[in-house]
Amino acid sequence: MRKKPRRPASRGRERDGARVGHESSACFPALIRATALPAIFRNSVLKLHQDSSAALNTVTGYGADYVEINLVRHNGSILVLPEDPVVPWPVNAFDALTPELFDMLLPLKPEVVVFGSGSRLRFPHPRLTAALAAQRIGVEAMDFKAACRTYNILMAEGRRVAAALLIEA
């Protein structure tokens, strides 16, 4: 009985007299030479940590009955902008919203207001936000948790965003 010849362990191929296998870097010469990469990828830095600036108001935590801004816990509804002091928002129920409560945002001059409507998504009546719309200030309604996350994203992008976070009692 005749034995079959054994294959090499690397199962590579030969190309131009050089052995090319899976473990060989010769398979991917373009990935190894930096000059083969487009200019946009050369000398780029990948950051794997979150920027933190004490100068900007950032949502650092939240729960069913609180929100933390820069590690300071707030147990009531608040208005937050990146560079302004956190302002208490005197409302504790969605049904208690009035146009005057949303008018508190006008002197702050945000580009967009992220309205956190509590534990579930609810949309404020257009008459409540009419003054903001007249000043071309957008209002995006979402549940409280989504509003906190969205505020952080827009704030990190450098947008002039305000968060109106309703914490229901």
Image: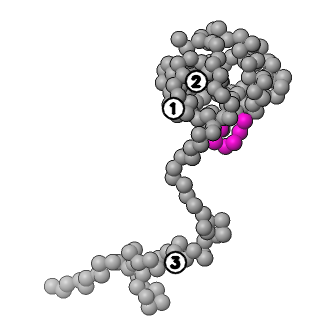
Residue reaching furthest bottom?
A: 17
Query: Disc 1 designates what residue?
Result: 71
Q: Is residue 125 visible?
A: no
- Report the amino acid beneath label 2: Asp
Determine if the magenta segment contains residue 17: no
**Which of labels 3 and 1 is toward the front?**
1
- Specify few, some or many for label 2: CA neighbours under 10 Å numbering under 14, 14-19, or 20 or more: some
**Residue 100, picture quadrant:** top right
Point out which mark residue 143 bears.
Answer: 2
Residue 53, image x, y percentages: 59, 42
Q: For the point 69% across and 42% down, which residue is it?
A: 158
Distance of mark 2 from mark 1, alpha carbons?
Answer: 21 Å
Query: Which comes sooner in the sequence, label 2 or label 3?
Result: 3
Query: Which comes sooner in the sequence, label 3 or label 1?
Result: 3
Determine if the magenta segment contains residue 158: yes
User: Judging from the image, what secondary structure is the residue with disc 3 in?
Assistant: helix
- Report the amino acid beneath label 3: Pro
Residue reaching furthest left?
A: 1
- Front-most of 68 and 164? 68
Residue 153, image x, y percentages: 62, 39
Residue stretch rendered in magenta on the structure: 155-160
- Report the amino acid beneath label 1: Leu
- Specify few, some or many for label 3: CA neighbours under 10 Å numbering under 14, 14-19, or 20 or more: few
Q: For the point 75% across and 13% down, which residue is it?
A: 99
Distance of mark 3 from mark 1, alpha carbons?
Answer: 49 Å
Q: Is residue 20 visible?
A: yes
The answer to whether the residue labelled 2 contacts the one labelled 1, judged by CB atoms less than 8 Å apart, is: no
Point out which mark residue 29 bears.
Answer: 3
Q: In the rendered image of this protein, does residue 59 appear above or below residue 46? A: above
Residue 86, image x, y percentages: 63, 26
Query: Which comes sooner in the sequence, label 2 or label 1?
Result: 1
